[in-house]
Image (spheres, rainbow, N blue to C red):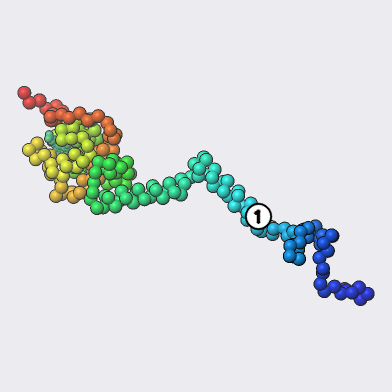
Amino acid sequence: MLNPTEPVITRREPDPVKPVSEEDSLRPHIYDGIQEYDKRLPRWWLYTLYGTIVFAGLYWAYYQAYQFGVAPEHALKMEMAANADTAARKSGNLDDDLLWKMSVDAKVLAAGKVTFETTCASCHKPDLTGMIGPNLVDREWIHGGYPMDAMKTITEGVLAKGMPAWGPLLGKQKISEVAAYIFSHHKTGEQIVPVAGWTMPGAVPAP
Ligand code: HEC
């Protein structure tokens, strides 16, 4: 209730000496006859600011300092590289580098293993250690020990020695998978020992 004896105040003149309130004090300066209140920043604004500071600290710690997470720019790079690999595989532009990468790709290896066990194991043994066909897990190679050499041998075969040409039967993709499977038993840069041929275990070597 208004007290009828008190005059109704419609407009409050700022008093330059006495602050209007604790929060909104008048600043001492006057420019061009204009005075300013020292307005406090709203709480929501301040909390947003503090929030971003805390977030920046946590983000930095998580991604940069302790590397709990893969930083987005790194994740993007890895994804781009994976896409490039997939595109190269699809385009059929194989090289040693790509086959080595495929040799650590679980999906490729699972497919390569199936092909190996159904098509190759009868001569090379399921554990790849060789029987009619040579050992594929040692470092000795007759036709070259780089992934692309094996691609060529598998595709074209060595008909005179009893290794069939798998190109027409399996196609490039299956051959690349099975080559990747063979090289998953090897390491990049390992020593390659060229040899003239393979003697089946238990067979009498040619004189
Ligand atoms: C009928 C038996 C037979 C089958 C099946 C066979 N291979 Fe062979 N493979 C051979 C023989 C024999 C050689 C050795 C050729 C030589 O002495 O020149 C050979 C050689 C190879 C080599 C070259 C090894 C070297 O030291 O250079 C690779 C790689 C290979 N085979 C992979 C495969 C793959 C992969 C498959 C299945 C898709 C397969 N082979 C199926 C008999 C076979």
In this picture, residue 73 sits left or right of residue 162? right
Residue 125: x %, y % from top left: 20, 36
Location of residue 16 by image quarter: bottom right
Q: Is residue 12 above or below residue 80?
A: below
Residue 24: x %, y % from top left: 77, 60
Note whether residue 123 is visible.
no
* Residue at the spot 76% in from the left edge and 61% down from the top edge: 30
For this orientation, the residue located farthest to the left is 207
The amino acid type of the residue labelled 1 equals Tyr
> Quick one: 24 or 142, which is closer to the camera?
24
Quadrant containing the N terminus is bottom right
- Label 1, secondary structure: give it: helix
Q: Residues within 10 Å of mark 1 (few under 14, many from 20)?
A: few
* Residue at the spot 14% in from the left edge and 27% down from the top edge: 202
In this picture, residue 13 sits left or right of residue 142? right
Residue ID for mark 1: 47
> Quick one: 80 or 202, which is closer to the camera?
80
For this orientation, the residue located farthest to the right is 5
In this picture, residue 23 sits left or right of residue 121? right
Note whether residue 20 is visible.
yes
Q: Is residue 128 above or below residue 89?
A: above
> Quick one: 159 or 93, which is closer to the camera?
93
Quarter of the render that holds ligand 1:
top left
* Residue at the spot 27% in from the left edge and 46% down from the top edge: 111
Residue 49: x %, y % from top left: 63, 54
Mark 1 Cβ inside 8 Å of ligand 1: no
